[in-house]
Image (cartoon, rainbow, N blue to C red):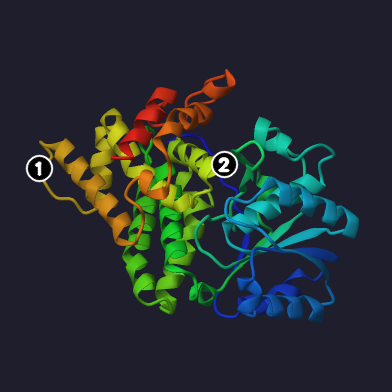
Amino acid sequence: MNNFEFYSPAHLVFGKGVENRVGEMLVGKCKKVLLHFGGGSVKRSGLYDRITASLEKAGIAYCVQGGVVPNPRLSLVYEGIDLCKKEGVDLILAVGGGSVIDSAKAIAMGVCYDGDVWDMYQTGKAIEKALPVVTVLTIPAAGSEASGDTVITNEEKQLKYGYGSNHLRPLMSFMNPELFYTLPENQVANGIADMMSHVFERYFTNTTHVELTDRLCEATLKTIMHNAHKVLDNPENYEAWCEIGFAGTVAHNGLVGCGRDQDWGCHNMEHELSAIYDVAHGAGLAVLTPAWMKYVYKDNIPMFVQFATQVMGVEGSFRQPEDIILEGIEKLRMFFLSIGQPATLSEMGIEEKDFELMAKKCTGAAFGAEHPVGGLKKLYWQDVLNIYKLANE
């Protein structure tokens, strides 16, 4: 096990009706908030009215900015930064899913930075402060309600980069599983794939003697898969949504990655799909992950045998480990298909002519400074290209 520090300060307020407590719980923490959200569903559902009524009752002033879309855009972040400075905002209230929260975090650090907020995404430059962020989660997926991470798309340059800082961990997050009842099936499926990938990126490691976090990863993955069809079959299954929602937070608040080298190869590869084709992040991960597993498993056969047996329930002779591994990978692929995820990159509209460019952008080779991605196996652009091809078979 590696040395580690674990810091997860987000105050999680969980359960029925908790969104009505936003105002009272922000008293003394801010004077004016930016209410940041996506499309019209927040208003149509009545959630917007409940939150604004809560703020008004508590005497908290607010201004609003909607319009966040999946793969949140840098241009809207710039607009949000200008609005916050003009209005004297001292807290960002993100109402939505991971895209809204990621956009809110970008605004939060951009308000406190004199230069271009994109600098942080390009260079990884450390920030010294950011406005506090509070979230009301409407889609369990990204885990951004408890993480210090944010991902933004620069639509002009067709680049999608992530950034992380403990200064960006939300001050408080409200999660009412009832808010998930009306989610479209494709968004549910994308969320399930995304949160599972957050665990995979930590689970698949060359670090040894990490039994506790191995078991936490496995339990989180099994909980998500066990409840996935329950919420798809009955969108108002409150108890199943509780399991899914809480699992999404645990998957990405840092706990299951403590003490272990992490991978993040699949996330880096998927960002290139989203940057050019604007595809759903979870769908891209569902296609890429089994292909990545097939490409890298020989570099750590015991790890993949453990996954196949402990997570996917594969039985067989340990004298034939590769058979066990390949069956586990296939069972994962079939699970993703069973919840409605695509089977190949071409099914998502991604053209093979762009594979090499995406592979080179992923590893920096397109910019003259190649650096491998991934942890369990270092992947150079030719490796990424091969995985894209595998994901298209």
Q: Nearer the viewer, mark 2 or mark 1?
A: 1
Return the mark for residue 117: none
Would you place residue 387 above or below residue 288 in this image? above
Left or right of 210 in this view: 178: right
* Picture coordinates of residue 67, whole percent (x, y): 68, 61
Front position in the image: 300 or 191: 191
* Picture coordinates of residue 222, whole percent (x, y): 33, 58
Would you place residue 196 above or below residue 94 in this image? above
Instruction: Say whether residue 262 is visible.
Output: no
- Label 2 or label 1, whichever comes before in sequence order: 2
Left or right of 42 in this view: 289: left
Q: Quadrant of the N terminus?
A: top left
Front position in the image: 209 or 175: 175
Return the mark for residue 5: 2
Residue placed under numbered mark 1 in the picture: 317
Would you place residue 334 above or below residue 320 in this image? below
Q: Based on the displayed image, in which of its 4 quarters is residue 88 positioned?
A: bottom right
Front position in the image: 45 or 58: 45
Label 2 Cα neighbours within 10 Å, binned few <14 / some 14-19 / many ≥20: few
Label 1 Cα neighbours within 10 Å, binned few <14 / some 14-19 / many ≥20: few
Q: Residue at x 34, y 46 (%)?
A: 344
Q: Secondary structure at mark 1?
A: loop
Q: Secondary structure at mark 2?
A: loop
Task: Give the residue type that dot 1 points to.
Answer: Ser
